[in-house]
């Protein structure tokens, strides 16, 4: 039950962890945009995807994220990946013959283009997944809500309740484990009364779920009422001015990392817009140069992190 | 100085049945008062009236000499802290330090002063090493101590414990009672109201208000109430251990009825 929350925050003291959460979200958006560019041919598409993945791997090493967690989230998506593959391979695309036929199943031709197409989508999926994993593993939920509130600040002009939404979000996040425990308890209590959640027809299982949902909702509402009282008793007023315990400072590290992400995006846009292919003169050397640049960055960031003793705070 | 004055207080949730009827008593500054009563005696309602979450239907409450009006309510609340029953439902922050900071943020305490206050109060309740922990990793007793720290951070004059130990195991209860004793020693000015149905806990206080069916049944010091233990049974409360012990000793022919607490009893026996 507790493994339900994928990509949970793990408290370390790394370079990525210490970045401003607002910056991390901006970098995430920049990198996600970079993932979705189209290139002239497939070999370039895969190389660019590889470069981006290489960059994310650096991020994961720096921020102490285990590859097991990435694999785990990929495994939970195996069905989606399979469906993507099957649909893309079976549904004929325009100019499917252009790259030739890979092989035949019986009399049905499987085109190379369709396989490449689905590979491209899977690569994008992996990239997006690992990017979000980096964000969620290095940013505590509270920092995340702070960043969201900050991004919604301009909307306050049109009386958009940015602070209220951020507070609601942080309380919701705080209560996820509590409510999960509650769910487990109610399930056990109802099972002991003879409710069967795991076997039987769909209709009877649906009825069993009702026996879980109703008490869960009632207790959640009671909780929220008590919580509202507790907040009011401690002087909370959503409209009043408050000070802040957590204050984030935009540091040199933030500028540096945002710049790096933007340079990466710039490179990707250039390769895509200038319609470069592998045959274009100088493309191959440039790719090699950018890879070696990334390796330098890896080494540099590694040095920075070890100097600051990237130690574990708590697990 | 009288810190709380309650006169003919009446309250009802539905307009028909009065949960509190003509309750009158006052609380001296620096005292530790217990309000006891069985379930449905109106004791939690009293706590909610005191903190201003509910408005009285009749009679009046005054705290620090102020009436509970719309203008005064925030001023009064800033001087009263309350610890509720359920440890989970009053933990607002996502970590211990965030939860303690929540009240400080609401009171607009400058950010650079917060860490000092948080360190100080968390040391007071022995939760210093848990500052970065999340609530689900803490026990009930620890969560309640964080709640106490959150209240202490705002340095109130009056703290209400609304059955703060009711959902805890014996160890958690002991921890909370030790924390309360420590708080009183550190700050003798602090007034405490403990709302409870644990008779032993109540007998640790300076004065006990016994509520029954929304009315004040009796008010007195533990020693005074000890002699009326028979009447406590009649309104559904347990008899204190000391009283039970004295009764059993009496039936064995040992008369120690003038001992007011356990120490005196032990001295008399040995």
Image (spheres, rainbow, N blue to C red):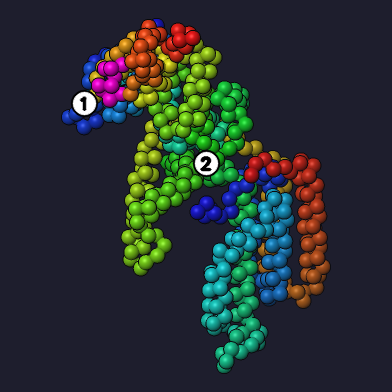
Q: Secondary structure at mark 2?
A: helix
Q: Residue at x 78, y 62 (%)?
A: A291
Q: Quadrant of residue B230?
A: top left
A30 vs A247, nearest the viewer: A247
Q: Secondary structure at mark 1?
A: loop
Dot label at residue B136: 2
Q: Residue at x 62, y 47 (%)?
A: A10
Q: Which residue is mark 1?
A: B18
Is residue A222 depicted above or below B128 in this figure? Answer: below
Q: Is residue A179 left or right of residue A103?
A: left
Give the farthest residue toward the left. B16
Q: Position of residue B1 (x, y in %)?
A: 39, 6
Q: Residue at x 65, y 41 (%)?
A: A314
Cα distance between the residues tagged 1 and 2: 39 Å
- Asked if the magenta segment contains residue B236, the reply would be yes
B242 vs A133, nearest the viewer: B242
Q: Quadrant of residue B39?
A: top left
Q: Is residue A12 left or right of residue A223?
A: right
What is the span of residues highlighted in magenta in the rendered image?
B229-237
Q: Using the image, name the chain to which the residue with label 1 belongs.
A: B
Q: Is residue B171 left or right of residue B24?
A: right
Residue A266 seen in render: no
- Asked if the magenta segment contains residue B210, the reply would be no
Is residue A21 depicted above or below A46 in this figure? Answer: above
């Amino acid at each position: 039950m507790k493994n339900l929350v994928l990509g949970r925050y793990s408290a370390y003291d790394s370079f990525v962890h210490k970045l401003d959460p607002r910056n991390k979200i901006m970098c995430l958006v920049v990198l996600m945009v970079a993932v979705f560019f189209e290139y002239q041919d497939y070999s370039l598409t895969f190389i660019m995807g590889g470069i981006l993945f290489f960059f994310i791997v650096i991020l994961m090493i720096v921020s102490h994220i285990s590859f097991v967690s990435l694999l785990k989230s990929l495994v939970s998506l195996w069905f989606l990946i399979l469906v993507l593959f099957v649909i893309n391979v079976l549904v004929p695309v325009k100019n499917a013959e252009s790259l030739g036929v890979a092989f035949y199943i019986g009399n049905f031709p499987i085109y190379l283009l369709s396989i490449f197409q689905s590979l491209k989508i899977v690569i994008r999926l992996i990239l997006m997944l690992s990017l979000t994993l980096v964000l969620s593993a290095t940013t505590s939920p509270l920092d995340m809500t702070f960043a969201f509130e900050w991004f919604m600040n301009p909307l306050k002009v049109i009386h958009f309740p940015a602070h209220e939404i951020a507070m609601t979000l942080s309380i919701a996040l705080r209560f996820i484990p509590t409510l999960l425990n509650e769910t487990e308890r109610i399930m056990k209590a109802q099972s002991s009364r003879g409710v069967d959640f795991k076997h039987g027809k769909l209709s009877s299982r649906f009825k069993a779920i009702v026996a879980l949902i109703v008490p869960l909702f009632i207790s959640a509402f009671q909780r929220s009422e008590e919580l509202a009282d507790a907040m009011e008793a401690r002087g909370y007023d959503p409209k009043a001015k408050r000070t802040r315990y957590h204050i984030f400072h935009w540091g040199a590290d933030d500028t540096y990392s945002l710049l790096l992400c933007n340079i990466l995006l710039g490179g990707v846009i250039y390769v895509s817009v200038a319609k470069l292919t592998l045959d274009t003169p100088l493309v191959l050397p440039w790719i090699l140069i950018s890879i070696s640049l990334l390796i330098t960055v890896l080494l540099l960031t590694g040095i920075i992190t070890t100097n600051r003793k990237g130690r574990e705070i708590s697990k | 100085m009288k810190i709380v004055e309650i006169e003919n207080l009446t309250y009802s949730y539905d307009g028909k049945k009065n949960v509190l009827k003509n309750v009158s008593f006052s609380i001296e500054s620096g005292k530790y008062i217990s309000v006891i009563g069985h379930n449905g005696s109106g004791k939690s309602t009293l706590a909610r009236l005191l903190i201003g979450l509910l408005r009285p239907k009749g009679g009046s409450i005054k705290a620090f000499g102020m009436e509970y009006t719309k203008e005064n309510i925030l001023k009064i609340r800033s001087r009263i802290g309350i610890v509720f029953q359920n440890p989970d439902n009053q933990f607002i922050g996502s970590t211990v330090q965030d939860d303690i900071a929540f009240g400080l943020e609401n009171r607009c305490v400058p950010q650079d002063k917060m860490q000092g206050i948080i360190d100080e109060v968390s040391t007071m309740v022995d939760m210093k090493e848990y500052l970065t922990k999340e609530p689900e990793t803490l026990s009930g007793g620890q969560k309640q101590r964080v709640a106490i720290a959150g209240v202490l951070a705002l340095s109130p004059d009056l703290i209400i414990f609304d059955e703060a130990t009711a959902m805890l195991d014996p160890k958690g209860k002991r921890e909370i009672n030790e924390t309360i004793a420590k708080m009183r020693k550190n700050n003798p000015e602090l007034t405490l109201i403990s709302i409870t149905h644990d008779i032993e806990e109540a007998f640790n206080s300076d004065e006990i208000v016994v509520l029954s069916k929304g009315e004040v049944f009796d008010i007195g010091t533990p020693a005074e109430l000890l002699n009326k233990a028979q009447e406590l049974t009649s309104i559904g409360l347990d008899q204190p251990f000391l009283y039970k012990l004295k009764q059993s000793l009496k039936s064995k022919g040992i008369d120690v009825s003038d001992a007011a607490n356990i120490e005196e009893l032990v001295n008399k026996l040995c």
